[in-house]
Amino acid sequence: MAFDVFVTVLAGVGIGLSLAAPPGPVNAVIASHTVTRSWRAGFLVGVGATTADTIFLAITILARSVVAGIEPYVPFIALLGAGVMVYFAWSTAKVWKRADAIVGSTPEAHAKSYATGLSVNLTSPYPILWWLTAGLVLIRQLGPAVLVGFFAGLLLWISAFPFSSAGGAAACRAGLPGGPPLFDCLPARLRRLARLVRGGRPPVIGRRPTAVFRLSGAARGRPSSARTARG
């Protein structure tokens, strides 16, 4: 009996990870908030997204026929979600110039991180498509053990992913003498998005230049030509 419950919980964890782990807008925002703010900011983005998933779960349970009727409107929801992502990309590009001013977490910043995760997940087509497909499997197997595993999987991801992002950013900054700009510690896709928003120019992190050794220069034993006095 206990083994069956354990297997059911594991199945719920797998279902939760199938929703939370695939790359998408929410994970991009989690990584961005973690690198430019703090682990807690990235975690709160995930908490906001989990709140949205809880709302979707409740809607799916209470109104299965209504959920099935949403499918024709998914393209319009996707368009709305794209608009939200453009807005957040623009907002992120604006604050990168003063990233040193937002490293210190505040209650207001935490509330914004939570609201960001909630709004992005509510307007993203991916979770809606997931609830119309894999989510129906969860509903058919609905029970206390499955629900415990499902939310455990979500919690596992929104805790581990920001932690790994924060660790990667710290390792990136510590890996070179003087540390690279914070922008260089972002994933490649986020850097390309930031350059696109800023017309091909990378954001400048901080108010003053810092000493930077590029990977290519460090490998040859010499600093980059852009090295300045450490700020």
Image (cartoon, rainbow, N blue to C red):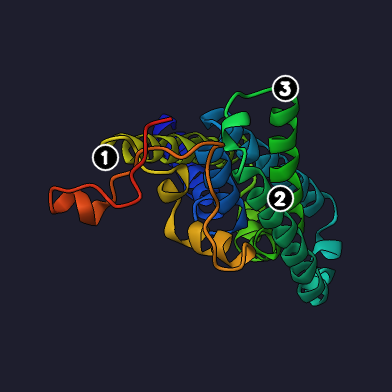
In the rendered image, the quadrant that contains the N terminus is: top left
- Mark 2: few/some/many CA within 10 Å (<14, 14-19, 20+): few
Kindly give the residue lying farthest to the left in the view shown: 221
Q: CA distance from mark 2 to mark 3?
A: 19 Å
Q: Position of residue 207 (x, y in %)?
A: 56, 36
Q: Which residue is mark 2?
A: 91
The residue nearer to you, when weighing 228 against 118, is 228
Q: CA distance from mark 1 to mark 2?
A: 29 Å
Q: Position of residue 102 (x, y in %)?
A: 63, 31
Q: How many marks?
A: 3
Q: Which mark is residue 176?
A: 1
| 3 lies left or right of 127 | left
- Mark 1: few/some/many CA within 10 Å (<14, 14-19, 20+): some
**Judging from the image, what secondary structure is the residue with disc 1 in?**
loop
Q: Position of residue 212 (x, y in %)?
A: 34, 43
Q: Which residue is mark 3?
A: 107
Q: CA distance from mark 1 to mark 3?
A: 33 Å
Between circles 1 and 2, the one closer to the viewer is 1
The residue nearer to you, when weighing 202 against 140, is 202
- Mark 3: few/some/many CA within 10 Å (<14, 14-19, 20+): few
Which callout, 1 or 2, points at the residue further toward the start of the chain? 2
**Judging from the image, what secondary structure is the residue with disc 3 in?**
helix
**Judging from the image, what secondary structure is the residue with disc 2 in?**
helix
Task: In the rendered view, tell whether residue 131 sits above or below residue 179.
Answer: below
Q: Position of residue 137 (x, y in %)?
A: 60, 58
- Residue at horizontal 72%, vertical 44%? 116
